[in-house]
Image (cartoon, rainbow, N blue to C red):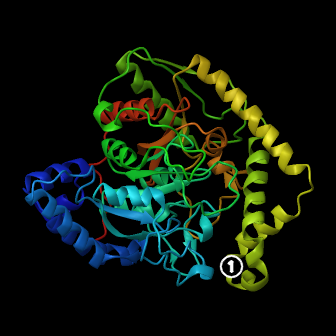
């Protein structure tokens, strides 16, 4: 096997090769480290690398195999961690000058679980400051770049994570998603990203004291099965997170290849409120959703209307930023992202009724989605309204020549952060400019398994992993 093929193996194939010692974790890890050293200066996916730690963890994984010890789910598999999640002994900046030299003395609980299952930590991936926006750049590390076109964005805030897996810089990337921050980069970079149900993966300690229950941790990968494997490693209750869900009693990886019978699939190209969608994206989603008929599933358009979703999300998001980050302004304002400062100040400007109103609208959004899922098992939408846009922009001001709001390009994702439903972005095609297009697969609350099974079924009909970025 040549080195490039090794870097683009699935995590599950890596696990089996390590278990049989056909390949060692040390061999795989060294090969990926070599590729990171070559490619990362181009893409800037990793902001901090931990190669000495990775070599140590890889040796430990191989030693477990040689000693015949019980292997964790991720034994020896190279993995990246987003720079919003603390890792003991590793610089964790949150993308902010405030924490530029911060080294935590503890692990985030999800990271602790990844370690326990035997992963090999390659380093931290780039993110915007405190994950506040939908593109990936910050004042410490600069822009992450899209592997398919270095002049367009990876999206964010898990942009470094998505760029890394698509570039062959590790098969597993831990991401987080507060409004689409797993699904947007997965869509723009051509990866598979899963936002689990709220509470499926516990969060402790939380980045923000007040988070209003919209952000989750999940996997970004090249293969759907790898997402199941990584989610199995991170899921489960944790006493420190009161929102964490009970055990579900099975492993996703054991059931993911089962094809559900009799599913009813609904699709929407606007969720009843999105103003405009790029024509190529719209055509791709319509063609892609028809593939589900190959499984005998019913496919039909959904009539629904999410009212005032942007107003609710924007109010909740900026109020959260204002409450949590106001204490930094006096000392650090001139060293913070100017757009983040603007959002903090916008959040500080709300009157006393704004946040309760946003929460009330959020409850109405949930009621609408609840009714949709009384009739349908799965909801399909575009992941984003457009393919990747120009590097350096925070958001596009126009789509199809039409003036749009800052959230128009991400209109399909953030509603499901507010309702808590599981949702994935899966590669579904390519634009005429050679950029990936993503399709969003949304499931009923707590039904990650169905989302994964439907994703796996689509992957079988429309695989994408044979395409790789060219950095030569």
Q: Is residue 394 above or below residue 437?
A: below
Query: Residue 457 sits in which quadrant?
Result: top left
Query: Residue 347 sits in which quadrant?
Result: bottom right
Residue under label 1, please give it. Answer: 336
The residue drawn where x is 53% and y is 42% is 281
Q: In this view, does 71 lie above or below 250?
A: below
Query: Residue 88 sits in which quadrant?
Result: bottom left
Quadrant that contains the N terminus: bottom left
- Is residue 359 left or right of 263 when viewed as pictured? right
**Where residue 303 sits in the image (x, y, percent)?**
67, 22
Quadrant that contains the C terminus: bottom left
Indicate the secondary structure of the residue bearing disc 1.
loop
**Where residue 138 sits in the image (x, y, percent)?**
58, 75
**Where residue 178 sits in the image (x, y, percent)?**
61, 53
* Residue 45 visible, this angle: no
The residue drawn where x is 55% and y is 20% is 376
Q: Give the camera-side residue of 366 and 206.
A: 206
Crowding at dot 1, Cα within 10 Å, few <14 / some 14-19 / many 20+, comes out as: some
Q: In this view, does 447 lie above or below 157?
A: above
Q: Give the camera-side residue of 59 and 127.
A: 59
* Residue 152 visible, this angle: yes
The residue drawn where x is 44% and y is 32% is 288
- Is residue 55 left or right of 242 when viewed as pictured? left
**Where residue 172 sits in the image (x, y, percent)?**
34, 56
The residue drawn where x is 35% and y is 19% is 295
Q: Give the camera-side residue of 377 and 90.
A: 90
- Is residue 238 left or right of 354 when viewed as pictured? left
- Is residue 292 left or right of 305 when viewed as pictured? left
Q: Give the camera-side residue of 468 and 114.
A: 114
């Amino acid at each position: 096997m040549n080195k490039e093929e090794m870097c683009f193996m699935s995590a599950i194939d890596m696990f089996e090769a390590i278990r049989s010692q056909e390949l060692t974790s040390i061999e795989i890890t060294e090969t990926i480290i070599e590729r990171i050293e070559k490619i990362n200066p181009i893409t800037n996916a990793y902001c901090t690398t931990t190669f000495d730690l990775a070599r140590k963890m890889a040796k430990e994984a191989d030693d477990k195999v040689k000693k015949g010890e019980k292997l964790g789910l991720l034994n020896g598999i190279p993995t990246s961690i987003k720079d919003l999640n603390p890792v003991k002994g590793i610089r964790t900046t949150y993308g902010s000058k405030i924490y530029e030299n911060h080294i935590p003395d503890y692990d985030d609980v999800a990271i602790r679980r990844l370690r326990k299952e035997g992963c090999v930590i390659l380093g931290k991936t780039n993110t915007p400051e405190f994950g506040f926006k939908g593109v990936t750049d910050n004042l410490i590390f600069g822009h992450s770049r899209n592997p398919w076109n270095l002049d367009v964005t990876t999206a964010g805030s898990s942009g470094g994570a998505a760029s890394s897996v698509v570039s062959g810089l590790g098969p597993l990337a831990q991401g987080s998603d507060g409004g689409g921050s797993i699904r947007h980069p997965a869509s723009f970079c051509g990866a598979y990203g899963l936002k689990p149900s709220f509470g499926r993966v516990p969060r402790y300690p939380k980045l923000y004291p007040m988070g209003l229950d919209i952000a989750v941790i999940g996997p970004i990968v090249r293969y759907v099965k790898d997402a199941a494997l990584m989610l199995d490693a991170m899921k489960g209750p944790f006493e420190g997170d009161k929102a964490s869900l009970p055990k579900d009693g099975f492993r996703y990886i054991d059931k993911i290849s089962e094809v559900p019978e009799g599913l009813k699939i609904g699709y929407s190209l606007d969720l009843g409120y999105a103003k405009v969608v790029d024509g190529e994206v719209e055509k791709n989603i319509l063609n892609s959703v028809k593939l589900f008929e190959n499984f005998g599933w019913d496919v039909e358009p959904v009539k629904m209307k999410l009212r005032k979703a942007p107003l609710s999300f924007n109010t909740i998001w900026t109020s959260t930023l204002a409450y949590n980050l106001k204490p930094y302004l006096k000392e650090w304002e001139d060293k913070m992202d100017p757009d983040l400062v603007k959002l903090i100040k916008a959040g500080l400007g709300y009157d006393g009724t704004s946040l309760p109103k946003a929460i009330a609208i959020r409850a109405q959004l949930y009621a609408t989605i609840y009714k949709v899922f009384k009739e349908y098992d799965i909801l399909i939408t575009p992941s984003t309204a457009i393919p990747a846009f120009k590097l350096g922009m925070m958001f596009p001001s126009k789509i199809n020549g039409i003036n749009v709001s800052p959230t128009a390009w991400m209109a399909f994702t953030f509603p499901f952060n507010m309702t808590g439903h599981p949702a994935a972005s899966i590669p579904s095609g390519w634009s005429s400019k050679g950029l990936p297009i993503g399709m969003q697969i949304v499931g009923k609350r707590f039904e990650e398994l169905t989302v994964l099974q439907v994703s796996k079924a689509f992957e079988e009909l429309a695989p994408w992993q044979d395409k790789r970025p060219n950095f030569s």
